[in-house]
Image (tube, rainbow, N blue to C red):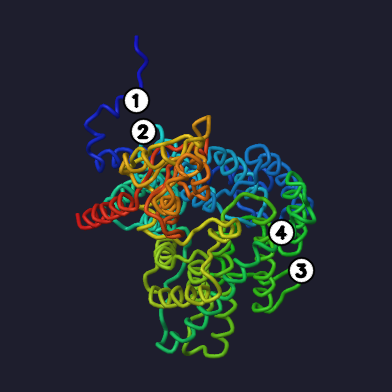
Amino acid sequence: MEKFNMKELLERSWLREKETVYLVLLAVVVGVVSGYASLLLRFAIEWVSLFWTGERTWLKAMETLPWYIYLVAPTVGGLLVGWITVRYLPGGELRGVSGVLADMVEHKARVHRHQMATETFGSAIAIGSGASLGREGPTVALGALIASEIGQRAGLSEQQLRILIGCGVAAAIAASFNTPIAGVLFALEVILADYAIATFSPIVIASVLATAIARSEVGNFPAFTVPEYHLISVWEIPAYMLMGVLCGIVASGFIKSMAPTRAWLARILPNRRLRPAAVGFVIGLMGLAIPQVMSIGYGFVEDMMLERINPELVGIVLPLSAFLAIVLIAKMIAVVLSAAGGFPGGLFGPALFLGATVGALFGDIAHAISPSYSESYGAYALVACGALTAAALQAPLTVMLIVFEMTADYHIMLPLMIACSVATMAARSFGRASVFTESLEERGIETHWGREQSWMRSVPITRIPWRSIPRVSEHAKLEELKQVYTGSGKGCVQVVDDDGDMVGIVTFGDLQEWLIDPALDQVVVASEVANRNVLTVRESDSLLDAIHILDSAEFEQMPVVSDDNSRKVLGILSRNAIFSTYHKLIVKHGERDHE
């Protein structure tokens, strides 16, 4: 019996001709699988925490936890994480949201498969063992990886694969945080930078399905339970704007501290296997004095919003402002060390924590100065957790909706909107990098490309019509070279060596100086005429790569070479063919946007 091949069946199916229907069906599959995978990761983190502390979160156990657990758990977790990371990502590849963005840019939306190990087992061990990171980064990577694998097996084009990865990301965020709308916006604003209807619809379907799955398993309730806070007076608006500026400054410092810390840790702890363990031990030492720095810390974020903080450290009751300032500084150090030290995990959760702490600190001071014209510090903690996160992610719209869905509190939306906008602008004045893109920029990976560039990146060179190019041997006489050039009418001739590999290209400009003296026809050979400084494009490159090359030089034609041999010419691309394809692409997507 012939072996059943799903991919071949789909390729023969009419669904292949119905792109939208096909993507919707795949989005259903991705939404369901990513929803369950996100829940599995969430439960895995809780299981590891339960193993070490006897509770599902570190916060619940910190008052009764033996002192040695603070040291042993993150250290042992670091040893395991170091082994997993070196085993599956030996080249130090990026992971989490940064890894997904890098794969979208450099690997044509094919997410590194080894992230399955680092982002499931590695992150569950790291966060559950006390590393000061969040779960959204691994969750996004897991959803993107699932979508990428399904899309590749279904034979999708790169553009379709990008949309499906957006479905996986949206489903993962929605299931993990019970935020279906924000899941969609996160995928569109942060991952894809594309709001076309054809892109939007499958992502919405995946997000809704994943949310329904999560709610059926863990219930339908907000991530944070907060009282109804209100805007007490219009005079609070300047206060929220000032707090937004402060959140933007803190977020910028948070982002900019990552690269120097990575370099410093790599210098003093060059062994990648042992580096997370050493960092884990330091975090454990910090946790002995300031237990709030351990793990994600969502419970403490909710305590700040509910104004039920116990400002006590090592048996000493401190003024609330002093306590919050110490926690803020310690948490930032712990987060930066965890991320730079090699622990897998996300930075969205820590950004929420840092923002809530900044807001509670600011609100405590503001309310003390003007109690009649300001809310209590819980309201400021709620708004600032969104403001700082918006600045750190450089995604204000997504974060506004995330905070709204995580708290189900509409009354605070006006100050939340103004604070998020101001914080994002303040952070952007120090640079455009986000917590997701700073590591990409450090490696020279372009990140600030928008919709139009993503479209061009999705069009392979093989889809642009190229022409054959005549060739002559490098030993051919000038007379023969002239005959081939004029006879072909192609405007250029390829000069090749004895193996058929390109030596150079001859255009009219190269040939012009040799046309004056006919006596040279039997003296000069083609290799002397050929221009050896030739810019080429590989067969695996994209339309965007070709346009970048054309922008860097003034010529009308460009050879296409093999991926395996940069001197094996497959054909020649004209400037007209490249820009004709570009114009057709813009028209096509313009029509899609209005459907």
Residue ID for mark 3: 315
Q: Residue at x 56, y 60 (%)?
A: 441
In this rendering, would 22 be left or right of 558? left
Apparent side of residue 401 relative to residue 595 in the rendered image (left or right): right
Labels 4 and 2: the sequence-earlier one: 2
Q: Position of residue 364 (x, y in %)?
A: 58, 81
| Residue 359 shows up from this direction | no
Label 1 CA crowd tier, 10 Å (few <14, some 14–19, many 20+): few
Per the model, the C-alpha gap separating discs 1 and 4 is 47 Å
> Can you give x and y, in whole percent of width and height, for residue 141 in the image?
50, 47
Point out which mark residue 263 bears: 4
Label 4: few (<14), some or many (≥20) within 10 Å?
A: some
Residue for point 27% across, 50% down = 198
- Name the element at disc 1: helix
Of tags 1 and 4, the one toward the viewer is: 4
Q: Marks 4 and 3, Cα distance to the nearest angstrom?
A: 36 Å
How far is disc 1 from disc 2 in space, using C-alphas?
A: 8 Å
Left or right: 15 in relation to 332: left
User: Considering depth in this image, is 555 or 566 the residue closer to the camera?
Assistant: 555
Q: CA distance from mark 2 to mark 3?
A: 60 Å
Q: Residue at 53% of width from left, 30% of height from top?
A: 498
Seen in the picture, residue 379 relative to 164 is either above or below; the reply is: below
Q: Earlier in the sequence, mark 1 or mark 2?
A: 1
Identify the residue under disc 1.
6
